[in-house]
Image: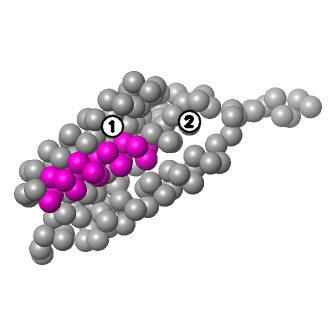
Amino acid sequence: MGAWYTIGLSLGLGLGVGVVLSALLGMNSAGLATALVAGAATGALVGLLIGDTAETIAGGIGGFLGALSAAAVVIGATRRGATRLGLAAFVGLAGALVALLSLIPLVGYLAAVALPVLAARMRGRQAARFAGLRTLAK
C-alpha cells in the first residue's frame, strides 16, 4: 500500500495503546505522567515493529496523544466519582476500538486529529460532581 498507510497505522495503533495505558494508569497525576511516558515509548515500539524511522516517530506521537487525550476523560470521571475498574474497562475498550479502526486506511490520521479535539471540548464542559438524587429532595 505504501508508506502513508504504515505511518497512519503506526499513528493509530499508538493512539490506541496510549488510551489503554491512560485508562489503566491515569487515575492521578503521577499515574498520568507514567501513562504519557509509557504511551510514547510503547507507541514508538509498535512503530518500530511496523516500519522504519517515520513509523517509529508516528507511533510515539500517537501514544503520547492518546494518553493525553484519554487523561481528560479519566481524570474528569474519577473526580466525579467513577470507579477505577469500570472506568478502566470502558476507556480501555475505547482504546482497543481506536487501535482496530486504525487498520482502515487514513483513519489513523483522522483519529490523531479527532481525539485531542474531542478531549479539549470535553474538558471545558466538565461539571463539578454529579448531584444524584439530592436534586429530587428539594
Please identify, in this view, whether the residue under mark 2 or under mark 1 is nearer the observer: 1
Q: How many marks?
A: 2
Whether residue 119 is situated above or below residue 73 in the rendered picture: below
**Residue appearing at x 28%, y 46% in the figure:** 63
Q: Main secondary structure of the magenta part?
A: helix
Residue 24 visible in the current orientation: no
Q: Is residue 66 magenta?
A: yes
Q: Position of residue 115 (x, y in %)?
A: 43, 55
**Residue appearing at x 51%, y 34% in the figure:** 75
Secondary element at tag 1: helix
Whether residue 34 is situated above or below residue 110 in the rendered picture: above
Secondary element at tag 2: helix
Contact, CB < 8 Å: mark 2 with mark 1?
Answer: no
Residue 37, quarter of picture:
top left
Q: Position of residue 27 (x, y in %)?
A: 45, 28
Neighbourhood count class around disc 1 (C-alpha, 10 Å): few under 14, some 14–19, many 20 upward: many
- Under mark 1, the amino acid is Leu
Disc assigned to residue 36:
1
Neighbourhood count class around disc 2 (C-alpha, 10 Å): few under 14, some 14–19, many 20 upward: some
Residue 5, quarter of picture:
bottom left
Whether residue 24 is situated above or below residue 8 in the rendered picture: above
Residue position marked by numbered label 2 in the rendering? 77
Q: Is residue 65 magenta?
A: yes
The C terminus is located in which quarter? Answer: top right
**Residue appearing at x 33%, y 34% in the figure:** 35
Please give left or right for residue 84 compared with residue 133 in the image. left
Q: Position of residue 85 (x, y in %)?
A: 44, 28
Which range is magenta? 54-70
**Residue appearing at x 44%, y 54% in the figure:** 116
The N terminus is located in which quarter? Answer: bottom left
